[in-house]
């Protein structure tokens, strides 16, 4: 229909160019080898001797040999260019064989005429017939070999592109799942930290008022029971609900990695000395206002530090915990590696390869993201946990 425009697929055009390039390279190599082989056949059948006797000069001999070489090279490139020009790459293998044979047969006529015109060409009919058939077969085989190579290369590249596409889709699916998980965590955190705590505070206040009324009515034992219920409810709100909301989404995670770790350390008992130290590279990232670590990786860091601190207090009976965090650049300016070291003054691991207990699942999470986790002892004899987590700078979401 008039005015109808068909959009061309850029990927298809790129694939055709790649096929053509591979065919040209492989075909040119094949026909160069054939031209050298034909030159050797010319010399073996007496062409070289005839040239020496007829030309009587080195220049004439070289000229005849060069002519034989160039004629066969020209024949090969004509066959290759002709088949490609006829669109052999877009056809099936039957059509490819027929086209290659047709072009080779047509190109063989001027080739043989040119070879016979060279004075030193052997006149033996067996040589003429043999070199003619060999040239025809070499033309067909040379083109088909180039097409096979191009097809194999294209197939390998297509499979590589497909694997890359599947990997990209998998990463996008994982990112989507992580985003949804973070959204649900925030929603549950808001419900626990906001709505549920508000209702518990309101119920506690109502119980306190009820206890006052009972006091006024002289029902002191009942008032004491109500106050105990209010205290128990307040304890549930302060400890259980807050702990659950932190487990769902750590406090300060939206603010940043450093802020969340500081809040985590601040919740420890006062007799445990804590400190956090930021390395120069991470401080530089913060000072220049770069996009920070994505929330998904941030949660991995926070939960791993929390588990390390819990193990230091529970298993190592530590009284001091020090966290050092820094960022290491990579070749990609947007790709960094977050390195964290948690030292304590506890007893430290007694085995060279200590059991990880709850840290095992954190190591799996880190390794899944290309990171690592190691547990050992520090120079003072306490425990030392070191973990690394690659991340890509991204705007906070």
Image (tube, helix red, strand yellow):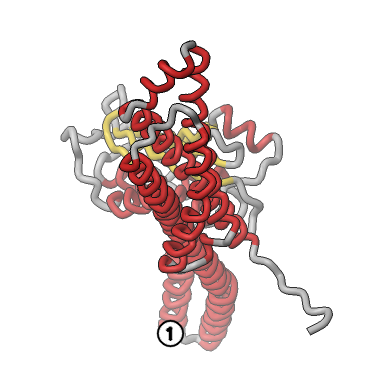
Residue 6: image location, x then y, percent: 72, 73
Q: Secondary structure at mark 1?
A: helix
Residue at 16% x, 35% y: name it.
351
Disc 1 designates what residue?
222
Quarter occupied by residue 86: bottom right
Residue 191: image location, x then y, percent: 55, 74
Between residue 314 and residue 284, name the one nearer to us. 284
Q: Is residue 328 left or right of residue 334?
A: left
Between residue 157 and residue 294, name the one nearer to us. 157
**From what the image shows, is residue 237 above or below residue 391?**
below
Between residue 126 and residue 31, name the one nearer to us. 126
Extreme residue in the left direction: 351
Classify mark 1: residues with Cα within 10 Å, few (<14), some (14-19) or many (20+): some
Residue 206: image location, x then y, percent: 57, 82
Quarter occupied by residue 289: top right
**From what the image shows, is residue 236 above or below residue 246?**
below
């Amino acid at each position: 229909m008039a005015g109808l425009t068909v959009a061309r697929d850029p990927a298809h055009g790129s694939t055709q160019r790649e096929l053509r390039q591979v065919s040209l390279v492989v075909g040119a190599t094949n026909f160069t080898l054939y031209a050298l082989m034909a030159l050797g056949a010319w010399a073996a059948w007496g062409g070289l001797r005839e040239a020496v006797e007829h030309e009587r000069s080195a220049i004439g001999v070289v000229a005849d040999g060069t002519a034989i070489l160039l004629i066969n090279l020209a024949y090969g490139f004509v066959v290759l260019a002709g088949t490609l020009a006829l669109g052999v790459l877009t056809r099936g293998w039957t059509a490819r064989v027929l086209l290659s044979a047709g072009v080779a047969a047509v190109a063989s006529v001027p080739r043989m005429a040119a070879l016979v015109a060279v004075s030193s060409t052997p006149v033996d009919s067996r040589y003429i017939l043999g070199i003619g058939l060999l040239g025809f077969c070499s033309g067909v085989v040379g083109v088909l070999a180039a097409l096979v190579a191009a097809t194999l290369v294209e197939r390998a590249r297509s499979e590589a592109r497909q694997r890359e596409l599947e990997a990209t889709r998998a990463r996008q699916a994982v990112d989507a799942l992580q985003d949804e998980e973070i959204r649900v965590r925030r929603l549950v955190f808001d419900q626990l930290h906001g709505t549920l705590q508000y209702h518990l505070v309101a119920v506690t206040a109502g119980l306190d008022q009820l206890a006052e009324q009972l006091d006024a009515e002289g029902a002191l034992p009942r008032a004491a029971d109500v106050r105990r219920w209010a205290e128990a409810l307040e304890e549930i709100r302060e400890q259980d609900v807050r702990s659950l909301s932190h487990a769902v989404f750590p406090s300060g995670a939206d603010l940043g990695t450093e802020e969340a770790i500081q809040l985590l350390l601040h919740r420890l008992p006062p007799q445990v000395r804590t400190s956090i130290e930021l390395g120069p590279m991470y401080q530089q990232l913060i000072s220049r206002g770069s996009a920070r670590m994505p929330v998904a990786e941030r949660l991995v860091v926070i939960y791993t530090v929390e588990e390390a601190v819990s193990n230091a207090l529970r298993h190592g009976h530590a009284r001091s915990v020090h966290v050092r965090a820094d960022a290491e650049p990579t070749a990609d300016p947007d790709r960094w590696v977050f390195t964290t070291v948690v030292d304590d003054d506890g007893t430290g691991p007694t085995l060279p390869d200590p059991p990880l207990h709850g840290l095992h699942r954190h190591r799996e999470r880190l390794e899944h993201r290309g990171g690592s986790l190691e547990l050992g002892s520090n120079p003072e004899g306490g425990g030392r946990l070191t973990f690394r987590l690659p991340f890509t700078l991204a705007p906070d979401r």
